Amino acid sequence: MNLKNEVNTSLCEVSNNDISISDYSGLCSFSQLNDKSKLEEVIKNSSISIEKNNQIKAPPSAFQIHFTFIISAKVFQLIKKQFLILFKIVYPTDFFQKVYEKKYYSIVGLNRLSGEIMCFSHIDVKKLSKTAYILAFGVVKEFQNKKIGGRLLTKIIEELTVLGIEDVSLMVQANNEYAIRLYKNFGFIIEEVKEDYYTFDDINENKAYVMSKKLSMKSKMLYESFIKMKPEASFL
């Protein structure tokens, strides 16, 4: 799945020496920071460092990810195939049509070196009600158990926060312990239990949880402060 030449990945580059907030999940949870000195203090106490020349460095990462919002026809078809591999449920045809027509907000993470698809998500964003629903969240099997899911979820939360979204929710299979643990680590809580949401042969797989998270405007203000310090990190 080499897509390096198929996708415009210039919107956001995450490397070991040039960090965007999407490379560090903790920043979204810090309190409001109104000036550079306070922001530097928070970063100093985290795993990010600011060198004497004000270059911001992230901790070394096993994978360098490009996040992009532009999906070519080829990328779209490859992601569609991943749905058959990763998900048990069958998504309706109009879902993929809406993805292709950009009626849903899409984020794709690519391996910076190989151009391979690593992860992806499709989100239904309602700006008027300031709500969002994560319709699909996937990490390609070769990249699972490598903390890629956390980096993708961080990116999603960043983008939704900047868009002014206040509530984000999703549906997850009740026996998907790994996903539930990931979402809880990011502040999602179980709002509702749907006993027979799915229709699999194994009734133990039919229960679903509706999970949600409140997004803080403080995170948006932190992001904006960060961009003022390092404008080239912006990916909007």
Image (cartoon, rainbow, N blue to C red):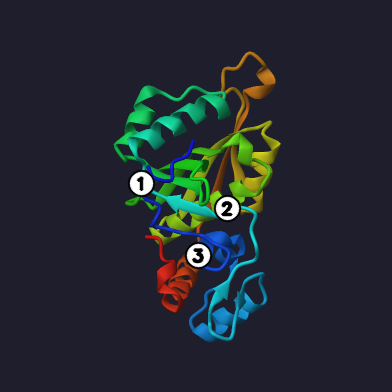
In this rendering, the answer to whether 227 lies above or below 158 is below
Task: Give me the C-alpha separation between circle 2 and circle 1.
Answer: 18 Å
Mark 3 or 1, nearer chain start: 3
Which residue does the image show at 56% across and 55% down from the upper left? 64
Task: Give me the C-alpha separation between circle 3 and circle 1.
Answer: 18 Å
Residue 97 at x, y percent in the picture: 33, 30
Task: Give me the C-alpha separation between circle 3 and circle 2.
Answer: 11 Å
| Near-viewer residue (90 or 198) | 90
Q: Secondary structure at mark 1?
A: loop
| Residues packed near mark 2 inside 10 Å, few (<14), some (14 to 19) or many (20 plus) | some
Which residue does the image show at 45% across and 78% down from the upper left? 229
Which residue does the image show at 37% across and 30% down from the upper left? 96
Q: Which residue is mark 1?
A: 70
| Near-viewer residue (148 or 179) | 148
Q: Secondary structure at mark 3?
A: loop
Q: Which residue is mark 3?
A: 20
